[in-house]
Image (cartoon, grey):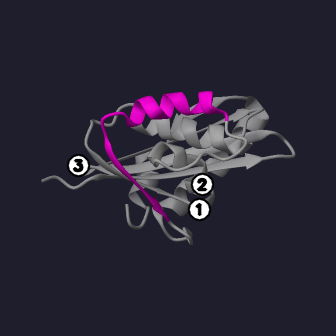
Amino acid sequence: MTAPARLWLAALHHSAFLNGGWAWVRAAGGEVAGAAGGDRRTSRARMALAGLADALKDLPRGALVLHVSPEDAALLAPLFGGEPPAEADTAAYAPAVAALAGRDARLATIAAPAATPLGFAAAWAEFGSDRAKAKGAFRSAIPKPNLAKVPGL
């Protein structure tokens, strides 16, 4: 039996500027990968869902453990059988629902992500938000040399 893929996902939203960012890092089958992105006029939920859909688009089907912060876990709970937040935009969940279809996925919450791959992803999510504020929507791969320095990845 192969080990499940591990995915760390972080999202960020600045309510004053209405911009947000997302980032993910992934370890699967001995390979590491990551990407970051952001957009204007968005929400944290949309950023978390966009990041998740992006992370899963090229990942082969199989077991998956998704590591997120408590805030993002509350937003992603509907994908794992939980209740959506009261203000949830159900249409925004469709791409992530499709990306998770047929996967054995588990949600794991990390309360203190500072020295973890989730902390690294959170820093890139902030970069994504800042970049989106300045230049608009974007997506970029995280360079492999940066990923190689992440403890626990």
Q: How would you rate the neighbour count of disc 2 (Cα within 10 Å): few for under 14, some for 14-19, many for 20 or more?
A: some
Residue on which the image places disc 2: 74
Q: Amino acid at mark 1?
A: Pro
The x, y position of residue 54, in whole percent, is 48, 34
Q: Which residues are magenta?
A: 89-109
Circle 1/circle 3 CB separation < 8 Å: no
Q: Amino acid at mark 3?
A: Gly
Q: Mark on residue 1?
A: none
Placement of the C terminus among the 4 image quadrants: bottom left
Callout 2 touching callout 1 (CB < 8 Å): yes
Q: Which residue is mark 3?
A: 29
Label whose residue precedes the other's in the sequence (3 or 2): 3
Q: Residue at x 67, y 39 (%)?
A: 88
User: Which disc, if any, is residue 70?
Assistant: 1
Whether residue 34 is visible to the viewer of this picture, yes or no, is yes
Residue 34, image x and y in percent? 45, 45
Tell me residue 108's x, y (percent). Answer: 44, 61
Q: CA distance from mark 2 to mark 1?
A: 6 Å
Q: Determine whether 16 is above or below 73 in the image.
A: above
The kind of residue tagged 2 is: Ala
Task: Classify 10 Å Cα crowding around label 1: few (below 14), some (14-19), many (20 and above).
Answer: some
- Label 3, label 2: how many angstroms apart (C-alpha)? 28 Å
